[in-house]
């Protein structure tokens, strides 16, 4: 198998299906061949130098998912620290776990066990109040997520902030007044921090997107990423995130 064989296949398929479908095919092929190389079934991966097709401009404009580059991420976190953004610990946790904003807001002390985090619920807003749900967004949302040093430090810092506020609650993330957090409040602070960082406005979902992007860039297997993200379908992981 040579790169030209793959390029011929792409040329044949691009006129029959959309760019996203072709790019999904390329991603799967790269992953399969990378595994074959690791197992020493082949000496090199002929798909390594194959680039993805560019999606039509309209598709890019309609795509609400946007990941920060490594440089943007660093600038965003510097800005969050500089302006003492009240949710800067929350940002770091999302960037290092890929949790949804509702899942982060719902975290309580008992969800942290050593270097692992248990996702078992989410929160929604109803009648002007934060409502703790009985479970996550989907059945696949029930999961255990590993915590690296940055994530653990963010949790410790959030608990210190909670103690400084002086509120008696098991919730890890609280507002300045000690009350529950609304996603819209977090997104408003993110907008202000983005402006200070000099990057295009984003929402909390971009932090989840950024985590997935870093994982994909590092060569993480899509199935593993699917489980970390709490997706019910590998199709969502591949087509939107990877």
Image: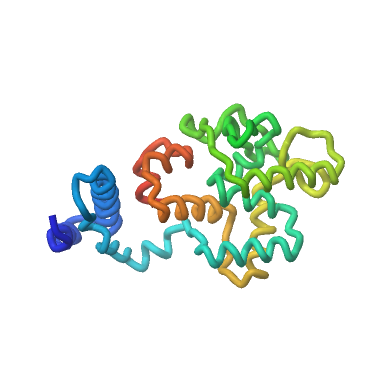
* Nearer-the-camera pick, 184 or 48: 48
| Percent of width and height locating residue 8 | 13, 61
Q: Quadrant of residue 14?
A: bottom left
Foreground of the two, 132 or 226: 226
Give me the residue at 20% from left, 52% from top.
43
Q: Is residue 22 left or right of residue 120?
A: left
Colour scheme of the rendered structure: rainbow
Report the front residue among 85 and 55: 85
Q: Camera-side residue: 130 or 223?
A: 223
Q: Quadrant of residue 114?
A: top right
Is residue 241 found left or right of 14 in the rendered image?
A: right
- Residue depicted at x 66% and y 51%: 184
Q: Quadrant of the N terminus?
A: bottom left
Can see residue 28?
no
- Compared across the picture, whether 117 is left or right of 180 comes to left
In this rendering, is residue 35 above or below 196? above
Residue 106 appears at what percent x and percent y?
65, 37
* Residue 180 vertical placement versus 95 (above, below): above
| Residue in the picture at 69% in, 61% down | 80
Image: 51 above or below 143: below
């Amino acid at each position: 198998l040579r790169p030209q064989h793959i390029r011929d296949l792409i040329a044949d398929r691009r006129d029959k299906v959309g760019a996203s479908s072709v790019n999904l095919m390329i991603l799967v092929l790269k992953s399969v061949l990378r595994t074959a190389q690791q197992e020493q079934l082949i000496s090199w991966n002929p798909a390594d130098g194959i680039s993805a097709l560019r999606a039509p401009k309209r598709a890019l404009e309609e795509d609400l998912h946007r990941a920060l580059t490594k440089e943007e991420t660093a600038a965003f976190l510097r800005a969050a620290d500089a302006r003492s953004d009240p949710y800067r610990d929350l940002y770091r946790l999302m960037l290092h776990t890929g949790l949804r904003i509702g899942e982060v807001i719902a975290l309580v002390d008992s969800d942290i066990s050593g270097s692992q985090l248990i996702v078992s619920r989410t929160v929604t807003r109803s009648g002007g109040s934060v409502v703790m749900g009985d479970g996550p967004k989907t059945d696949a949302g029930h999961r255990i997520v590993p915590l690296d040093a940055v994530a653990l430090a963010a949790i410790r810092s959030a608990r210190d902030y909670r103690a400084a506020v002086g509120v008696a609650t098991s919730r890890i993330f609280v507002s300045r007044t000690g009350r529950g957090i609304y996603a819209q409040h977090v997104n408003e602070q993110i907008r202000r921090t983005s402006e200070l960082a000099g990057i295009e406005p984003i929402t909390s979902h971009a932090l989840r997107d950024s985590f997935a992007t870093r994982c994909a860039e590092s060569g993480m297997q899509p199935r593993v990423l699917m489980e970390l993200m709490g997706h019910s379908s590998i199709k969502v992981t591949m087509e939107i995130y990877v």
